[in-house]
Image (cartoon, grey):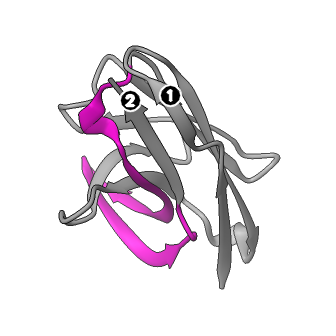
């Protein structure tokens, strides 16, 4: 079992920045890759960014160049730096753990409670 706790969400103006954090606990030895997903109101949850155990990253096209995922393995923490935020980035952001095979990410099914990001015009 892995427990995930996200933090760092909030209200920001268009063009602003936020940094999300997600701390993992429990069976952290089993963690390979970590990821961020988001769910906007009325929409499905979508993969935003992934980072492998070796630091290889993948991003959704809509955030590439604006968001940066990173991790601190010693702290079992993954971060999402979000710059130049747009209203369409507003969503609940969820942390996730899984594994990567090639460029494909496979979730292990552990989710945090999510953190709300609101972007005002």
**Disc 1 to disc 2: CB gap under 8 Å:** yes
In percent of width and height, residue 77 lies at 70, 49
- Is 108 drawn above or below residue 51 in the view shown? below
Of the numbered discs in the image, which one, if any, rests on residue 120?
A: 2
The residue at the point 23 percent across, 38 percent down is 60
Q: Is residue 59 visible?
A: no
Corner quadrant of residue 38: bottom left
Q: Residue furthest front?
A: 121
* Whether residue 90 can be seen here: yes
Question: Which residue is nearer to you in this view: 93 or 31?
Answer: 93
The C terminus, quarter of image:
top left
Image check: 74 left or right of 22? right
* Residue at the image position 52 percent from the left and 77 percent from the top: 110
* Residue 72 image point, x, y percent: 72, 40
Q: Which mark is residue 12?
A: 1
Q: How many C-alpha atoms fall within 10 Å of the one at disc 1: few (<14), some, or many (≥20)?
A: some
Closer to the N terminus: mark 1 or mark 2? Answer: 1
Q: Residue at x 47, y 17 (%)?
A: 16
Outermost residue toward the bottom? 1
Image coordinates of residue 49 in percent, x first then y, are: 37, 42
Predominant secondary structure, magenta span:
strand
Magenta span has 6? no
Q: Is residue 15 above or below residue 103?
A: above
| First to last magenta residue range | 85-114
In the shown orientation, is residue 67 left or right of residue 55?
Answer: left
Taking depth in this image into account, of 20 and 23 the one nearest to the observer is 20
């Amino acid at each position: 079992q892995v427990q995930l706790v996200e933090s760092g969400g909030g209200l920001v103006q268009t063009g602003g920045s936020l940094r999300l954090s997600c701390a993992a606990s429990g069976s952290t030895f089993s963690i390979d890759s970590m990821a961020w997903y988001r769910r906007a109101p009325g929409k499905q949850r979508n993969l935003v960014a992934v980072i492998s155990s070796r630091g290889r990253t993948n991003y959704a096209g809509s955030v590439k160049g604006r968001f940066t995922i990173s991790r601190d393995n010693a702290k079992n923490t993954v971060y999402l730096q979000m710059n130049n935020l747009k209203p369409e980035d507003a969503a609940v952001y969820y942390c996730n753990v899984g594994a990567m095979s090639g460029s494909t990410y496979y979730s292990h099914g552990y989710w945090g409670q999510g953190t709300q990001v609101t972007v005002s015009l």
